[in-house]
Image: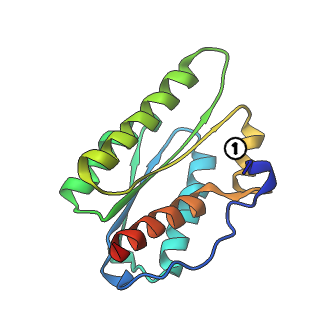
Amino acid sequence: MATALKNLSEHEKVALRKPEKLRIAIVTAHWNTHITQALEAGAADTLRQHGLTEAHIRIEKVAGSYELPLAAQWLATEWKADAVIALGCLIKGETPHFEYISEAVAHGLMELNIKHNLPFIFGVITVLTEQQALDRAGGIHGNKGVEAAVTALQMIALREKL
């Protein structure tokens, strides 16, 4: 469904066996901070609403979205995260830089999913304008950070079920 037709923050509570035992990391790109901070707040609040404690939510920052996959891998291996949420904001400019970074980050996170058999969630907004980003960071389309956190929890719930 197109984002224009959906509020990203609407979701049902995810049923988890022992949310207080989970360790979920959030790694946030510093670039476009006014957007990424809103995504991070939405993700962290959603995890807390689902029963995770502050001690089981780890938030780290990286310079930009390109650095997200490596930081996500470190959080999975060194901190032993059950899931990693990668948050960033890429706004298309006048050069092909946007395409290279978007593709690299998406591909890097997908490889980590398979390599580590853990959910690495792509919570990177890829938009054409700053207004589109604002609309997805607590604006008219909700908050992509909330959606990313719910996705992480749903993947953990699926693993528990299997």
Which percent across, then down, holds residue 68? 39, 42
- Looking at the image, can residue 64 be seen? no
Which percent across, then down, holds residue 85? 43, 56
Towards the viewer: 52 or 147: 147
151 above or below 104? below
Q: Quadrant of residue 98?
A: top right
Tell me if mark 1 has few (under 14), some (14-19) or many (20+) residues whose alpha carbon lies within 10 angstroms of its own. Answer: many
Which percent across, then down, holds residue 42? 58, 64
Q: How is the image coloured?
A: rainbow
- Secondary structure, mark 1, is helix
Q: Which residue is mark 1?
A: 133
Give me the residue at 67% from left, 16% from top.
94
- Looking at the image, can residue 1 be seen? yes
Residue at the extreme left: 78
- Amino acid identity at mark 1: Ala
Give me the residue at 76% from left, 58% from top.
6
Towards the viewer: 40 or 108: 108
Give me the residue at 53% from left, 38% from top.
31
Which percent across, then down, holds residue 105? 44, 35
